[in-house]
Amino acid sequence: MNIQNILFKYKKYFSIALLSKTIAILKESVVAYFFGASEIKDIYVALFTFSESFFGIIKSSIQNSLIPMYYKNNKKNNFLINYITILLYFLFFIFLIFISFGFYFFKKNYFDIDITLYFLIGLFSILGIFIVFNIQVLNVKKQYSKSEYSNFLISFLTILLIIILYNIYGKKLNVMIESSIFAFLIVLIIQIYYIKKLNLKILNIKYLHFPLQKKIFKNFFSLTLIFMVLHSSYSFFELYLAKQVAIGAISWNDYAKKLYLSGVFLIGGILLTPIYTKFNDELNNEKNFTFLNFTIQKIFLIFTFLAILLYLMSEILIKQLYFRGSFNYNDLVQVSNIFQIYIYSLPFAVIGLLLHNIIVSISIKTYFILNLLQTIFSFVFSIIFYKVGYGIQSLAISNFITLFIITILFLNYLIFNQYIEINHKNKTLYFLYFVGYFCLFCYIVYC
């Protein structure tokens, strides 16, 4: 099955996904209009990032383990029941850590906030975990349209609730937090309705299995441990570094990064779920590896062109999306400069998104090593470029260099283990591509 056939087969999913990602960008535009790059927005981003440093590790484990582990398990429904049991164990464990010392650590190192808002953002993250789990369950059941519909509803309801609550409370932090929580609650209820229609028993407490399947527990624990160490530590560092620059710097980086990630998922992520689901479904099929090789080449070509185009249009794009209301000219300049660097890494971000999900299907040990290297590179390059004097842009520069190196390592791993084959001519073309693209990046950063 080639990319054209995938597009045709999942046309409904792609239509909803396109709308969903567009609405997500619009949501950030609404937030920029009401809150700009203010201290309130900084606190919200810091709170959300801090909370996700704890709870986001479980989300990442779900996103990276559920689909490949599901396809390797013979008793599919029993697997899902065991999986959600393990999920509840880990959620309880992480929640204890979050409430035991998280609040005082955040208050001491970042911002002085009310404890009620801290617990609300924790509730928001917990709801997010169950939403991600439900989305992955719908994906493994090939219900792509319904899973993406959840993302659309979250963004749409959040926009609606921000406008309503802003007119009631004014420019306050609880407006963003409460609007997010209410949106998540509504979507979670709709998701449960969808899953019940699939006749799965995973949402009924009496079906939870004890003792747990050791292999599922081991794999889930391994991935959760990886993200606990790697994702959390770098998130804390990223927040700390941004806070040192200036008031609003956290928000500048957040606006630029979210728009860049929206580009990754809007154009690239829409294709990836069916592609890596197909790969896992036919893991040992030789034709599947030929398909993967061809897909990687196409992604490099398409997204290199898009990255350069979006780089050239970056200021116009930021101006059209954000430059109104509380978002001033200084914010426009800062966000545009950061976004230019982020968007240049688009091809490697999309390839990385695809290869992450494929490598975790092949070897969790390799996945762990590559993620460890990615975090180390992110730390090292962020500190180097911050010390050199690039300020908040150092995070975006570090993102590009790290993704560039990790993509090369990913590809070499797949070539070495014969999951993809590249002839001598293609090797030369790949080499020239990587060298040329990196040289152009150096020129952009230097200028």
Image (cartoon, grey):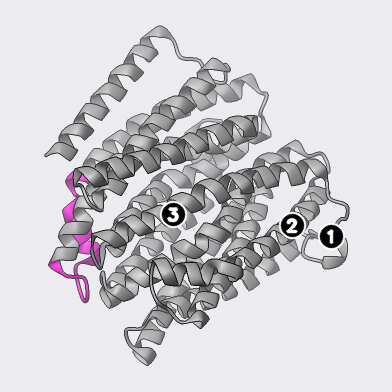
Quarter of the image for the C terminus: give it. Answer: top left
Give the spatial CA distance, label 1 vs label 2.
8 Å
Residue 310 shows up from this direction: no
Stretch of the chain drawn in magenta:
311-329
Residue 148 drawn at (x, y percent): 53, 57
Mark 2 packing: few (<14 Cα in 10 Å), some, or many (20+)? some
Quarter of the image for the N terminus: give it. Answer: top right
- CB under 8 Å between discs 1 and 2: yes
**Going 55% across and 32% down the picture, which residue do you hit?**
369
Residue 434 shows up from this direction: yes
Which amino acid, mark 3? Ser
In the visual, does 333 lie left or right of 435? left
Earlier in the chain: of badge 2 and badge 3, it is 2
Image disc number at residue 164? none
Q: Mark 3 points at which residue?
A: 235
In the visual, does 61 lie left or right of 342? right
Q: In which quarter of the image is residue 146?
A: bottom right
| Front residue (pair 415, 320) | 415
Give the spatial CA distance, label 3 vs label 1.
33 Å
- Whether the magenta-drawn stretch holds residue 340 is answered as no
Which amino acid, mark 2? Ile
**Going 74% across and 64% down the picture, which residue do you hit?**
197
User: Relative to 126, does residue 215 appear above or below in the rendering?
Assistant: above
Image disc number at residue 208? 1
Which amino acid, mark 1? Leu
Mark 1 packing: few (<14 Cα in 10 Å), some, or many (20+)? some
Image disc number at residue 84? 2
Residue 328 drawn at (x, y percent): 16, 70
**Going 58% across and 75% down the picture, which residue do you hit?**
186
Earlier in the chain: of badge 3 and badge 1, it is 1
Earlier in the chain: of badge 1 and badge 2, it is 2
